[in-house]
Amino acid sequence: MRVKTSVILPNDLLEMVNSLSGQYKSRSQFIEIALRYYIAQIKREKQNSRDLEIINRFADRLNEETYDALKYQIPL
């Protein structure tokens, strides 16, 4: 479902939107796609940050396991 809304934008930003939205059905479609892309990027960054936090929390234990596994390798 689509809802009509009103957004106030700086003039220079609106000019950029207008200049880039030509290949889309409408300015609204362009803004919708841009917002979806930006929101997905924010979600990815948050997930990456959480993942990095988990990796860092367990880094010492993971490194110990890796060093232990490397002991079993045979030199080539």
Image (tube, grey):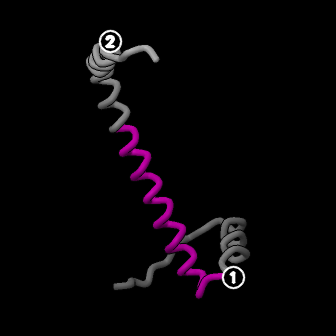
Is 59 placed above or below 7 here? Answer: above
Q: In the image shown, does 3 or 38 lie closer to the viewer?
A: 38
First along the sequence among labels 1 and 2: 1
Quarter of the image containing the N terminus? bottom left
Instruction: Pinpoint residue 59: horizontal percent, then vertical percent.
Output: 32, 21
Q: Which residue is mark 1?
A: 22
73 w.r.t. 33: above or below: above
Q: Say what amino acid the circle numbered 1 marks.
A: Gly
Marks 1/2 in contact by CB < 8 Å: the verdict is no
How many tags in the picture? 2
Residue under the point 56% across and 70% down: 8
Name the dominant secondary structure of the magenta segment: helix
Residue 5 coordinates in the image, percent (x, y): 45, 79
Q: Which residue is at the front of the view, 35 or 6?
A: 35
Magenta-colored stretch includes residue 9? no
- What kind of element bears circle 1? helix
Q: Is residue 20 left or right of residue 63?
A: right
Q: Amino acid at mark 2?
A: Lys
User: In the visual, does 38 lie left or right of 57?
Assistant: right
Q: Which residues are magenta?
A: 22-50
Determine the residue located farthest toward the front in the rendered image: 76
Closer to us: mark 1 or mark 2? 2
Q: Measuring from the top left, give residue 4's x and y in whole percent.
A: 43, 84
In the image, is residue 76 above or below residue 44? above
The residue that disc 2 covers is 71
Q: On the image, which quarter does residue 66 sit in? A: top left
For label 2, the SS is loop
Q: Left or right? Give the position of 59 relative to 10.
A: left
Give the CA separation, mark 1 to mark 2.
60 Å
Q: Which mark is residue 12?
A: none
Q: Residue at 38%, 84% (x, y): give it.
A: 2
